[in-house]
Image (cartoon, rainbow, N blue to C red):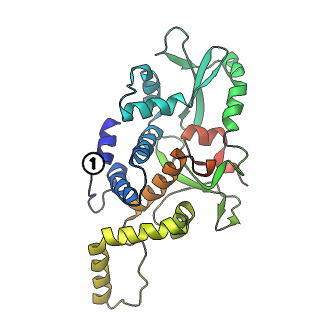
Amino acid sequence: MRENYTIATIPQKPKRGEENWYKFSSEVIQEMEGLGFNRENLLISVIQHICDDLSFDEKQKIISVLPKLKETDLFEKTVKNYFKIRMLENKGITGIFLENKGTNMLYIKNKTNENKWTLAEAEDINDLTDKIEELKNRFLPVAGKLNNVVGFMSIFKKDANNIVFKTKVFKMNGVVKKRNKGTRCYGKSIEMMKEIMSDDIYIEYLDFIHEKYKDIIEEKQKNRELNDNTDAIPDELEAINQTHACVVQEMFLRFYNVENKEKKHWFLTPEEAILIDIENLSL
């Protein structure tokens, strides 16, 4: 986890064909900082991605060592807080949901050994029922509590711990979307990026990357001229590749969630997405 965080916080130049999320996030952090976004909240966004991306077994290990994590270190403090704010407490019982191949498993902390967690029994679930409902009500009803586009992490295949970034669209360009279960990000979407960023920020972002990747854009223009393809309309985002575009979308959604923009939720953990059945929700 620390290695991935280090990659994301040091300037990188991903090679052609490379898809390392953390290398591209280092590029996106620079871009968003250039637009005036707060660096600490950008780093918190990256750390939350790291936590969301953990497997079920890895999350089990992490919660068993939470008391040892240092409050003086931004990385460890954010990891610790990521899990602590999702804990449910009632009648002396502390529980937490952990996603396991598309299903939420409720784990309970041992009362005498805070490093030991066990699968909840029926009585534990009953004692935490009210808290579970309170957790759901942080996100429901959709109107007023969730953004028009919500990012979330979900398994790609039911039989594997392959977590991917998805977006759920409730409304796009003022039009309510029905029967939209959420889709995996596959790259550039001007419509999606405008909806997430807002038109003004999107224009600022384009201006920034056009300046940052000026040489790349000029090279693509020359290639069009050489191939006698000058009538082709240039892709506004041609300077960045598909992976880069997906990281941009995810980081904007995560950042706005960290900042509690408009007092709405912009991003959900795998457990939160399962808890409210995000794929089957609609306005």
Q: Is residue 12 left or right of residue 68?
A: left
As shown in the figure, which amino acid type bears the numbered disc 1?
Ile
- In the picture, the quarter occupied by the C terminus is bottom right
Q: Residue at x 32, y 52 (%)?
A: 23
Residue 209 seen by the camera: yes
The secondary structure type at the circle numbered 1 is loop
Where is residue 98 drawn, in percent x and y?
A: 54, 31
Q: Which residue is mark 1?
A: 10
Where is residue 162 drawn, in percent x and y?
A: 46, 44
Where is residue 47 drawn, in percent x and y?
A: 41, 40
| Res 176 → quadrant | bottom right
Q: Residue at x 71, y 53 (%)?
A: 282
> Vertically, is 231 above or below 51?
below
- Total labels drawn: 1
Q: Is residue 73 left or right of residue 194?
A: left
Which residue occupies the foreground of this view, 245 or 99? 245
Crowd rating for badge 1 (residues with CA inside 10 Å; few <14, some 14–19, many 20+): some
Q: Residue at x 65, y 47 (%)?
A: 278
Where is residue 61 drawn, in percent x and y?
A: 43, 25
| Res 71 → quadrant | top left
Residue 189 seen by the camera: no
| Res 212 → quadrant | bottom left
- In the picture, the quarter occupied by the N terminus is top left
Residue that protrudes farthest toward the top in the picture = 112
> Vertically, is 208 above or below 256?
below
Q: Residue at x 44, y 58 (%)?
A: 248
> Vertically, is 118 above or below 233?
above
